[in-house]
Image (tube, grey):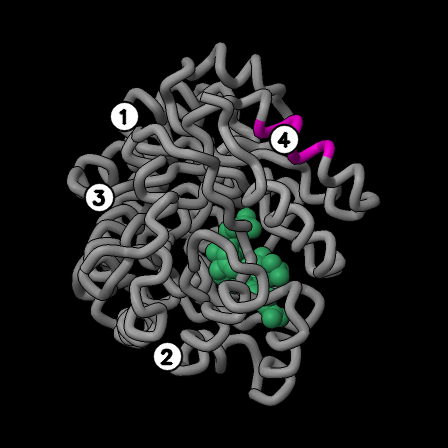
């Protein structure tokens, strides 16, 4: 079935379009009062994530409220560790916490992986099917997963961290064990993304949120090979690779065949184009804090970004939208992109 507004898919395929498509990372949840209300009525974050009907509802909230050009399925990257056998709690105001982590070969041996692990996530696939039906082909649906390194970081560290020094320590002290865990995560992620696509995802994004804490050499050893495996296994799918804080690695992402390279805001558009070339489709990269500015400034900053990247661009922020961003400012960002037109 043809999607009515398939701007995002056309841009991701490298086609020329009339204006950039726009969506926001973390648009589902966080910023919408409707989300907070629903969230307060259930037992917690995981009660929402594991309920397909509610997950579909949260996915559609920003579509109806903001008129963005894509929906992203409401879920979390941490469902993968859970499916592999590492449970987590989402602690109010603190974030994720894993009672058990992976430190030894014995911990690793206890984990499920691949298709066996991915079949534990039936609730995600059901949420995708419900969302797809409710979207009625208005706009594309984005499926996502964490990158192997970012998932590894949570499974070893056991929580969020500024440095992820426990996770990085394992890379330096037990590299063979680290590679085994990364391989298990990768096998699971591939099976998971395939099932997400079968359940209705039109395009996939892989979030390497903690890419920037690895040195270039470590990123080459512990991250890129696994991203390459994902790209190869999903050769027929449209794929957005977002390695936050790792501009040194973006050319490698383009070379391995990412349809879209996600950018953060620590780079100018000319420098990014220098790295990736004029034809590479990019996504980003407005500073999420720019959405705290006055409307005229938001319009100016957004238009400048659109002009500077030129064609082959998906308008987004350089990371997820922050929870306390005024909704009218998010609306201003989206409207500015939707009113923009390429000159030729
Ligand atoms: O983009 C979307 O709106 C889709 C839903 C989505 C969530 N998490 C829902 C969520 C997506 C794509 C994610 C990805 C995710 N989760 C990442 C990668 C993207 C990034 O921002 O770097 C990471 C690192 C996580 C792990 C995670 N989940 C953390 C650290 C936290 C706590 C802090 C926070 O981000 O709010 C979560 C919880 C979470 N995931 C919430 C939502 C809406 C808030 C939970 C709540 O309602 O209390």
Q: Are marks 1 and 4 in contact (CB under 8 Å)?
A: no
Callout 1: SS: loop
Quarter of the image holding residue 108? Answer: bottom left
Q: Residue at x 63, y 52 (%)?
A: 321
Callout 3: SS: loop
Q: Give the mark nearer the N terminus: 3 vs 4.
A: 3
Residue 242 placement (x, y as % from top left): 45, 37
Q: Are marks 3 and 4 in contact (CB under 8 Å)?
A: no
Residue 52, numbered label: 2
Residue at the extreme right of the image, as rendered: 294
- Asked if ligand 1 lies within 8 A of label 2, the reply is no
The range drawn in magenta is 300-306
Q: Quadrant of ligand 1?
A: bottom right
- Asked if ligand 1 lies within 8 A of label 3, the reply is no
Label 3 Cα neighbours within 10 Å, binned few <14 / some 14-19 / many ≥20: some
Residue 192 located within the stretch drawn in magenta: no
Q: Residue at x 31, y 29 (%)?
A: 14
How far apart marks 1 and 3 lie (CA) works out to: 13 Å
Q: Residue at x 36, y 62 (%)?
A: 138
Q: Which residue is mark 1?
A: 256
How far apart marks 4 and 2 lie (CA) works out to: 34 Å
Q: Which residue is mark 3?
A: 237
Residue 155, numbered label: none
Which mark is in front, 1 or 4?
Answer: 4
Residue at the extreme top of the image, as rendered: 274
Q: Which residue is mark 4?
A: 265
Q: Give the mark nearer the N terminus: 1 vs 2.
A: 2
Report if residue 165 is visible in the image. no
Q: Residue at x 51, y 49 (%)?
A: 23
Report if residue 187 is visible in the image. yes
């Amino acid at each position: 079935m043809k999607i009515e507004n398939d701007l995002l898919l056309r841009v991701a395929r490298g086609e020329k379009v009339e204006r950039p498509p726009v969506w926001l990372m973390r648009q589902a949840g966080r910023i919408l009062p409707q989300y907070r209300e629903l969230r307060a009525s259930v037992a917690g974050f995981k009660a929402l994530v594991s309920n397909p009907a509610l997950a579909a509802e949260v996915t559609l909230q920003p579509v109806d409220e903001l008129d963005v050009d894509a929906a992203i399925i409401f879920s979390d990257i941490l469902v993968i560790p859970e499916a592999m056998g590492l449970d987590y709690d989402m602690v109010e105001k603190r974030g994720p916490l894993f009672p058990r982590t992976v430190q030894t070969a014995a911990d690793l041996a206890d984990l499920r992986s691949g298709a066996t692990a991915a079949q534990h996530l039936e609730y995600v696939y059901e949420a995708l099917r419900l969302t797809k039906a409710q979207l009625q082909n208005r706009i594309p649906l984005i499926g996502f997963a964490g990158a192997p390194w970012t998932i590894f970081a949570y499974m070893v560290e056991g929580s969020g961290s500024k440095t992820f020094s426990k996770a990085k320590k394992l890379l330096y002290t037990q590299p063979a064990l680290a590679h085994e865990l990364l391989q298990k995560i990768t096998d699971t992620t591939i099976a998971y993304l395939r099932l997400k696509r079968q359940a209705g995802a039109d395009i996939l994004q892989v979030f390497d949120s903690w890419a920037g804490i690895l040195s270039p050499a470590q990123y080459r050893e512990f991250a890129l090979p696994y991203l390459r495996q994902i790209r190869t296994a999903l050769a027929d799918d449209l794929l957005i690779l977002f390695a936050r804080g790792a501009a040194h690695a973006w050319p490698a992402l383009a070379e391995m065949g990412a349809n879209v390279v996600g950018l953060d805001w620590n780079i100018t558009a000319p420098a990014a184009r220098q790295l990736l070339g004029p034809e590479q489709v990019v996504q980003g990269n407005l500073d999420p804090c720019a959405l705290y500015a006055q409307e005229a400034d938001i319009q100016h900053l957004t238009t400048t970004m659109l002009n500077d990247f030129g064609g082959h661009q998906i308008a987004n922020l350089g990371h997820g939208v922050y929870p306390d961003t005024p909704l009218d400012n998010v609306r201003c960002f989206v409207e500015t992109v939707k009113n923009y037109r390429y000159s030729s």
